Image: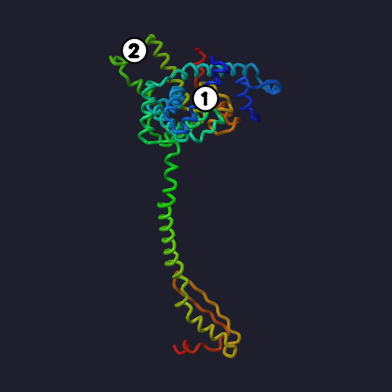
Amino acid sequence: MQTEATLAQADVSEMDLVKRCQAGDPEAFDELVTRYRTRIFGMIYNMVHNEQDAWDLAQDSFVKAWRSIKRFRGRSSFYTWIYRIVMNVTIDWLRKKQVKGVGAEFDDAIQAKQIDPASKTAPKAGALPYEIMERSETRTRIDNAIAQLSPDHRAVILMKEIEEMQYHEIAETLGCSIGTVMSRLFYARKKLQNLLRDVYENI
Amino acid sequence: MKTFEEKWTAWLDGQLTGKELIEFEASLPDKAAAKLEKRDAKKLGALLKRELGTHVIANEEFFSHQLRERIARENVEPFREQAAEVPTWWTVRRLFWTGTASLALFFVFAVFVMREKNPAEQSQYLSQILNARVDPVVSPNATISMFEAKGDRVTVLWTEGLQSLPADYAAK
């Protein structure tokens, strides 16, 4: 757990990195990418459920952030700012995909099912086979349940439950009111509770 | 907080305090069911955190490498492209296209608007009749109306009180 002093130091050095980026220093931007790439990739993956799409969208988001870094005024944290870019890019992509109706919603889940279980090249994990299967089934259930939410509801529930963001941070990221965030959370939770009741009851 | 949804969400997340909390809990018709649902919401949150919070990027260094290459390849620098292009665009390209568009608009106006307003052919008889009208001796109470249908290329002159036609027209 970070103390307030270390948090302050981290903030200062982050602002320092941002200022260097604004002066056109790509190495400073590289440092910011290193700090946030995992969290951002994970968040996008939870929204789109496809490794390749998540990779591309994360790349697009960072390029967009680099292009517009001079507009960052430091009113919010850098992470909140880049998160807004990430959410805009991802939600736009999801909406376009829904409109076009191209491709399966969960490509990775389908690919996993298509892997030959007897394949010698399949990766070996430490967990027992039944544990892996159970975990995979749980994950698929959750993915399918999240897929039934609209992009906006997905974003809100993931930011709240996974990122543990405050209402006002989510509102700022999505460009909506706190009331809208709370309302979306209400409906997203209700839907997921109905769809996943038997899953979380067994925890 | 105005709506029930907002209050319920705040209550689930432990954000309701003091008077608001007491009032909200008092308004719940079935407190036991509400508490069960609150417990469910906590379990759902824990499940999502456990299952979705662990996804990691497969090759972090390659991700950064690819991003660095992409930024370098596109020669993307913050605001450089906009800053570099604005003066050139204004001085050469935009001025050229603005001039071309203005000329095109002028020709369109000249061909389709000004030509139709050319009074030479349509009003020669009107001029003659008006000339006749101004002569108080010839036609002191003459009134003249003109009706024109451009689509059909028809013009009708309606005259009243005309004592005589102009000499040139009468000769025809």
Task: Name the residue at 47% across, 35% down.
Answer: A68
Rendered view: A183 above or below B117: above
What residue sits right under mark 2 in the picture?
A124
Which residue sits furthest left? A120
Amino acid on which the number 2 mark rests in the picture: Lys
Q: Earlier in the sequence, mark 2 or mark 1?
A: 2
Quarter of the picture containing the C terminus of chain B is bottom left
| Image position of B148 with respect to A161: above or below | below
Q: Is residue A144 visible?
A: no
**Colouring chosen for the image of the structure:** rainbow
- At x 51% / y 74%, what residue is drawn? B147
- Of all chains, the one bearing label 2 is A
Reply above or below: B30 against B81.
above
Q: How many marks?
A: 2
Instruction: Name the element at disc 2.
Output: loop
Instruction: Give the residue pinned by disc 1.
Output: A159
Query: Residue B145: image x %, image y %?
Result: 55, 77
| Above-or-below relation of A82 to B150 | above
Please identify the quadrant where the N terminus of chain B is shown: top right
Query: On the same chain: label 2 and label 1?
Result: yes
Q: Is residue B12 left or right of residue A145?
A: right
Count neighbours of disc 2 (C-alpha within 10 A) and say few if under 14, some if 14 to 19, many if 20 or more. few
Q: Is residue A169 left or right of residue B17?
A: left
User: Could you say where residue B13 lies in the image, as x and y percent from the top left?
Assistant: 60, 21
Query: Could you tell me which chain the residue with mark 1 belongs to?
Result: A
- Which amino acid type is marked by label 1? Met
Q: Position of residue B29 (x, y in %)?
A: 67, 21
Give coordinates of residue B4: x percent, y percent: 64, 27
The answer to whether residue A140 shows anywhere in this view is yes
